[in-house]
Image (cartoon, coloured by chain):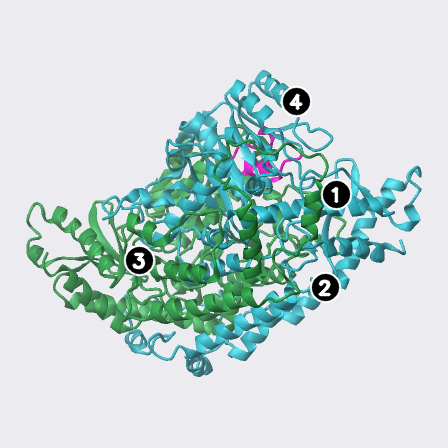
Chain colours: A green, B cyan
Amino acid sequence: MLGGDRRTLARAARQQADWQGAPGRPTRARSPSPPEDFLLMADSKPLCSRDGDPMAAEALLRDVFGIIVDEVIRKGTSASEKVCEWKEPEELKQLLDLELRNQGEASEQILARCRAVVRYSVKTCHPRFFNQLFSGWDPHALAGRIVTESLNTSQYTYEIAPVFVLMEEEVLKKLRALVGWSSGDGVFCPGGSISNMYAVNLARYQRYPDCKQRGLRALPPLALFTSKECHYSIKKGAAFLGLGTDSVRVVKTDERGKMIPEDLERQIGVAEAEGAVPFLVSATSGTTVLGAFDPLEAIADVCQRHGLWLHVDAAWGGSVLLSQTHRHLLDGIQRADSVAWNPHKLLTAGLQCSALLLRDTSNLLRRCHESQASYLFQQDKFYDVALDTGDKVVQCGRRVDCLKLWLMWKAQGGQGLERRVDQAFALAWYLVEELKKREGFELVMEPEFVNVCFWFVPPSLRGRQKCPDYSERLAKVAPVLKERMVKAGSMMIGYQPHGTRGNFFRMVVANPALTRADMDFLLNELERLGQDL
Amino acid sequence: MLGGDRRTLARAARQQADWQGAPGRPTRARSPSPPEDFLLMADSKPLCSRDGDPMAAEALLRDVFGIIVDEVIRKGTSASEKVCEWKEPEELKQLLDLELRNQGEASEQILARCRAVVRYSVKTCHPRFFNQLFSGWDPHALAGRIVTESLNTSQYTYEIAPVFVLMEEEVLKKLRALVGWSSGDGVFCPGGSISNMYAVNLARYQRYPDCKQRGLRALPPLALFTSKECHYSIKKGAAFLGLGTDSVRVVKTDERGKMIPEDLERQIGVAEAEGAVPFLVSATSGTTVLGAFDPLEAIADVCQRHGLWLHVDAAWGGSVLLSQTHRHLLDGIQRADSVAWNPHKLLTAGLQCSALLLRDTSNLLRRCHESQASYLFQQDKFYDVALDTGDKVVQCGRRVDCLKLWLMWKAQGGQGLERRVDQAFALAWYLVEELKKREGFELVMEPEFVNVCFWFVPPSLRGRQKCPDYSERLAKVAPVLKERMVKAGSMMIGYQPHGTRGNFFRMVVANPALTRADMDFLLNELERLGQDL
């Protein structure tokens, strides 16, 4: 099928000059009625045969599936293989031959391209990939993602996504139950940043429904509050939503990175004194760097006193709600108005799986976003059009993000997912204990989550804490070690400066396949990479 | 591996009450230091074995892959199978057993669940799925999507997405070249609605950079212009961005649904007279219902005279740029400042593949959106940090959307994709010619694209155009036929009212596997379904 298609194309190509990428070239005159040769073309064989021999397409997919099993699932998760294959950008461009040409390529070339893509890509499922808040993999979640891709539908109407409309609602209901709500609303968004934006937009709409039609100029100046340790998407969102980054009032945090409720109260007073109208507080459950949990009960008290919408950005820490042992870190979350929670992080559901959960039962989400496009949300459908959830969102087409989480949950059960969360905590604690036993490692602070922040102090700096250039020199260590580990392909771990602190490593324990041996490896490898510094 | 994991979990479960969904229940006291049993737990076998026997995970994925080949690719594309298996929501809920429980399930159950998900999902790759602007499938694009899912990375840094950072840039460069730009910028967005929002945000930032920090209240009232036939995302976007829907000035269209440049000019004058500052015109190349192309040259002239940002929403029509024969429909697009183009529609790249293209070479995209999060975009990295494109966008994690298009393009070549576009036009024209030959079909208008809009006039209404209730009765036909076709599973085609016109069908020819026989089927099937009306 594909071979034949390509041969036909090759013949056509010989009769036709390469025209692409030359848009200045004059095009044929308009044809008000269809020319005869196009009717002929329509009569020809379909471009992708369907009732004919599907073997070429299937063979291609089978071969690609084989590459995935061999290269991603086997090698990509093997500690004896590299986590990445570093290439300089110019070299990588050559290796990949990225240019898109007029002529198509044969199956063997396409398969070689798939192998190259996999080879030079970072293996985020590898047991030494500690670089982001997501890592590892789950076979059921991956199965769900592959089914999702093959079904290729959009989440907007029951008509074309009956299974997924019902499934999304069930998954959201489960997540809401874990938050502590027996009713409410929600939607899966393309990432936590957009979930956070939704919360801000909903809060301002709830207070000033006029905003939707008349815009922010019709409103008094607004103020929202979040801590200095919040995710950067809060400020990005404020800019995008037209509020401006100045509308974000930054609340102080304590030494562990938790929002100080008293400073929140103070800042609300300051904003009001300046003539701004406070409308939302965004608390964080699991900050990006330190993994800190804001004190939700105390913050909810403040919100209640001042009548403010409480949003909890639990993109990272939300999954802790699954753990009976650790969910106290989010005590008070049930008092929130909205919660952002990304199961693609700690639960390895796969990018992207980001839920925005709402306590609201007044259809706020739909009222805020609906525009009632008549071509999609016809009101004279033969089923209950309340099932057409597309008008709850600012997207039109929206990917199906529920199946991967649903299928994984069905396979692992809540128990299995809880065990993963508990295991991640336990391994983080193990790492902390081991790190303390070794010379040359210094904790930034005792973690309360699975972010373990620490400095590696190389031999030349040990015992020199009193030297005036100590901090400056220590800050240069992490980038050097990072370069070495990436070029060796042995490990990937993130680092960053933070406040007045120079660069330190942020280890994230998320991959459910990790063991103590991986924690030991991390420490050994840093010692090995940094022994000459 | 999975079996053993589950057995362990089952044992653990017997010792533990079901606690999930009972968030009000008190949780254990805080543990300031790790309890001994957690260190023990961390020592146990990893939850997902990796160096051990990966056979269970592989077997699951192989079985799921088999389901996809059999049920989606073979049956799902076969004209002799149903396009959908309609179930009432309550019945479908029962069939799917959606509830998420504490206990996990065995592989056989999970596979049965995958089969059920596929069975009750609509087959958008089916040759009788005409319901949306996307349909059909491409094996290479699907291969790219499956590779993307297995690699599970985020597009934000070169560090963790080296292949995809370079690939995205190359794909965007190619799309820009087809627009007519030898330089520029761009990004893949989660859908055309968000691409359109980006354009509006960039246009206001370019004119008023203060907006990012100080918000819309620091700006004069703004006005943007789009036609009455534009996509509903323009108004949704204006609300979300804080401009308010009132800021969208609706320009009249001609009888074919194209924006009237003279009315645009007039509306700009009206807005200015009312004290608003015009800043953007959003023209549409390929409107949603009629498939109309706005006259870009004339609109560009207006924008040039008034110094307005010209955005072209070519989410649907952009792929016509690949056709030497038909790209004249977008003449003038090279004069735009930004273009939204969704290759997931006519090119069957798969949801979602939505490019925002910019003519700008001043790094506007980054300046508008950057927030320089130090934990992700460290400036002391060992490679050129300009490759970290994550700060160009309002998302943080961002899915890889380039590989599916790149791989398909490599396989088909520009020629193959051009042929698909031309074929779609040819089939649409064939349908129009056939439709005219039959009694009982009435064109809404001659199409200029692959949207063919028409009424089916059932026997009882033929020759009764003069009756006072004709239009009212005709408008009720499409919903009835839609219900019948969906319940039969024979076909899916969209309908909608439009302006003063009652419900009519919008046939979309996009699936590259379609043939004349499918067009004939469409007409025959409508006649069959509507013969008693």
Quarter placement of the N terminus of chain B: bottom left
Q: Position of residue A231 (x, y in %)?
A: 37, 48
Calculate the distance from the C-alpha at mark 4 to the C-alpha at mark 3.
Answer: 54 Å
Amino acid type, label 3: Asn
**To which residue does mark 2 refer?**
B88
Q: Position of residue A408 (x, y in %)?
A: 49, 69
Calculate the distance from the C-alpha at mark 2 to the C-alpha at mark 4.
Answer: 47 Å
Q: Are marks 3 and 1 in contact (CB under 8 Å)?
A: no
**To which residue does mark 1 refer?**
B453
Amino acid type, label 2: Glu
Q: Are marks 4 and 3 in contact (CB under 8 Å)?
A: no
Dot 3 surroundings within 10 Å: few (below 14), some, or many (20 or more)?
many
Q: Chain of mark 3?
A: A
Query: In front here: B65 or A395?
Result: B65
Calculate the distance from the C-alpha at mark 3 to the C-alpha at mark 1.
Answer: 52 Å
> Bounds of the magenta span?
B229-249
**To which residue does mark 3 refer?**
A131
Calculate the distance from the C-alpha at mark 3 to the C-alpha at mark 2.
Answer: 45 Å
- Decide if residue A359 is in sight here: no
| Residue B508 shown in magenta | no
Calculate the distance from the C-alpha at mark 1 to the C-alpha at mark 4.
Answer: 25 Å
Q: Residue at x 46, y 65 (%)?
A: A64
